[in-house]
Image (spheres, rainbow, N blue to C red):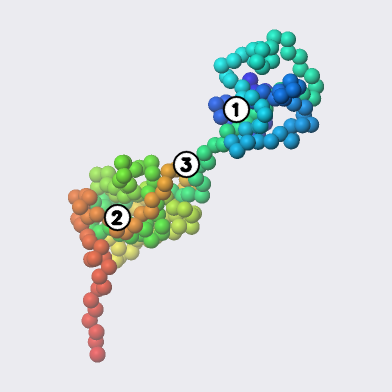
Amino acid sequence: MIKEENSDDPTLKNVAAKDLRLFLAKKEDGRWLDEDEAPAVALDDQGHPQGFKVMRPSLDLKNDEYFGESFQRNEGEIHVLVVVLEQAQPQTGLWLVNGSIENAKNTKGIRCRLYRLVASYLGYYDPARRTGDKDNALWYEDKTLCIHSLFESKENALLFDNVLQDECITPTSPLDGHAVSTNAAPFSRELSELRRIYSRHYVSQDTESPQVTMLSLSRPTPRSLTW
């Protein structure tokens, strides 16, 4: 009823009824709270108005404990105090990059390269894809490598997105010549603890694709010198 009669109130408009707590605005001396007294009502450490009884949903409003059968409203009186329970706020400001690399499974070094790139741009695992204690941001579906990584800033997400598109036309990259599809978008969801993605999380034995070690990627390429 309170929700229906206050549908235009921006404070209550998007709040579910279960997230409201109602307090009978009757003072200890039996008087109803006056509208001029309302701003001075003190709140306890839970945000509840002090000195007022919480109303139980199991009792009818006509119960003698509340309003009784012969209740008459007088102008200027307040009869119910409404408290909106504190809501868990979604973590905002995150960005999600989804993508895929076609025919990646038969090319050596692609997944390893992706771990390095996503770690370089400070990527995070999405807790929604966590199974037990195992996170997953890069996985194969048939021969396609799928990408799903969170970033704390729009800049890092777009830089990662951009570098993936550059890698597929870079002759020295294992992604060269592969079709790369990516999408970066804002991401808002209530999340548990975020975990970073690091290069060392690459485990070559996780898939049947051609393997590459971190050592082979980081070792300098020998060059001949002419004197």
Question: Quick one: SS at disc 1?
Answer: strand
Estimate the spatial distance between the alpha carbons at disc 1 and disc 3, rounded to whole Å.
25 Å
Q: Residue at x 66, y 27 (%)?
A: 52
User: In the image, what residue type sits under mark 2?
Assistant: His
Q: Which residue is mark 2?
A: 201
The disc, 2 or 3, on the residue closer to the chain's N-terminal end is: 3
Q: Residues within 10 Å of mark 2 (few under 14, many from 20)?
A: some
Taking the image as shown, residue 63 lies to the left or right of residue 153, namely right
Q: Which mark is residue 21?
A: 1
- Check disc 3 and report the residue beneath it: 189
The residue closer to the viewer here, 40 or 180, is 40
Label 1 is placed on what type of residue?
A: Arg
Q: Position of residue 57 (x, y in %)?
A: 57, 19
* 225 on left or right of 46: left
Of badges 2 and 1, nearer the viewer stands 1
Instruction: State which quarter of the image contains the N terminus.
Output: top right
**Among numbered discs 1 and 3, the one appearing first in the sequence:** 1
- What residue is at 27 percent from the left and 55 percent from the top? 202
- Image: 193 above or below 83: below
> Which picture quadrant has residue 65?
top right
Residue 36: quarter of image? top right
Task: Tell me how far mark 2 sits from mark 1, CA to CA.
Answer: 47 Å
Rendered location of residue 157, percent (x, y): 44, 54
